[in-house]
Structure formats: C-alpha cells, structure tokens
Image (cartoon, rainbow, N blue to C red):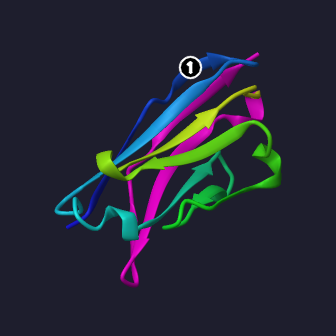
C-alpha cells in the first residue's frame, strides 16, 4: 500500500519561505518515477484546490495564484516530491496535501499545515 507523508509545514511571516516535502513509501522504490505527483491545499471553509503538478517526465504546471512564487520538483532517487514556497501570503494559509496517481490509483497524504501571519 502506497503511503505519502508530508512534512515541512509551520508558521511563517508574510514574505517568508517554506519547503514542503512528500515522501512516498510502501514498495514504491523502483516505480516512483511512474507516479504523477501533485500538491493540493485546503483553506478553512474552502474546497480543496490544485496547487501544482509534476509529471513522470518532470514537466510541471502550477495554479495562477502561485505562479512565480511556488515551485514543484521531484527526486526520484529519494521517492520524494517538494514544494518550494516563496513570497508567502496570508491567503496561502491552508493544509497542504500530497497526491500521487499511478496505475489508475489515487493516493493522498494526511496533509501538513502552513500558516502565514501578517
């Protein structure tokens, strides 16, 4: 069973940076490069929304509201995907979730909380 564990969240002042990590485990070692990965977020009282994606060939896409500020990347040797978040704003406050899609299956982590203060 694939497991995704996010880390790196916390409290940061507006304008600051954080780097989130999502480590995949559960027998994924030889096939992590086949996983399409993504970061989503859910702010209090709002629906979950897509933040950024990275495909199996490492091509990336990101939502307009994070373009130029957030960067998604992956390290297949470490079975890990990252989200570098710069120039954080209070509106970025949310629980950030890692998502993996492979072989018609969809996996989610439990999330990591990011709080951006004024």
Residue at coordinates 80% horizontally, 40% vertically from top-left?
68
Check if residue 19 falls in the magenta segment.
no
Pick the residue in front: 41 or 2.
2
x, y (%) of residue 77?
A: 31, 49
Question: As displayed, is residue 9 above or below residue 61?
Answer: above
Which secondary structure, mark 1? strand
Q: Is residue 71 left or right of residue 3?
A: right
Q: Is residue 99 left or right of residue 115?
A: left
x, y (%) of residue 96?
A: 54, 45
Question: As displayed, is residue 87 above or below residue 62?
Answer: above
Pick the residue in front: 24 or 12.
24
Residue at coordinates 46% horizontally, 60% vertically from top-left?
99
Tell me which secondary structure the magenta stretch mostly adopts: strand
Check if residue 113 falls in the magenta segment.
yes
**Quarter that holds the N terminus:** bottom left
Residue 61, by quadrant, is: bottom right
Q: Which residue is mark 1?
A: 11
Q: Is residue 10 left or right of residue 7?
A: right
Residue at coordinates 38% horizontally, 50% vertically from top-left?
110
**Quarter that holds the C terminus:** top right
x, y (%) of residue 5?
A: 33, 46
Q: Is residue 7 left or right of residue 11?
A: left
x, y (%) of residue 46?
A: 69, 53
Residue at coordinates 79% horizontally, 46% vertically from top-left?
67
Residue 63, by quadrant, is: bottom right
Label 1 Cα crowd, 10 Å radius (few <14 / some 14-19 / many 20+): few
Residue 12, by quadrant, is: top right
State the count of labels. 1
Report the magenta residues as a range.
90-118
């Amino acid at each position: 069973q694939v497991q995704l564990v996010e880390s790196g969240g916390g409290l940061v002042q507006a304008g600051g940076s954080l780097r989130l990590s999502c480590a995949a485990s559960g027998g994924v070692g030889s096939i992590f490069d086949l996983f399409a990965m993504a970061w989503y977020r859910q702010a209090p009282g709002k629906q979950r929304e897509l933040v950024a994606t990275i495909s199996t060939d490492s091509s990336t896409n990101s939502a307009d509201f994070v373009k130029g500020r957030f960067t998604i990347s992956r390290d297949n040797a470490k079975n890990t995907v990252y989200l570098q978040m710069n120039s954080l704003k209070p509106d970025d406050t949310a629980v950030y979730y890692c998502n993996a899609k492979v072989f018609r299956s969809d996996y989610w982590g439990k999330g990591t909380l990011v709080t951006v203060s004024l």
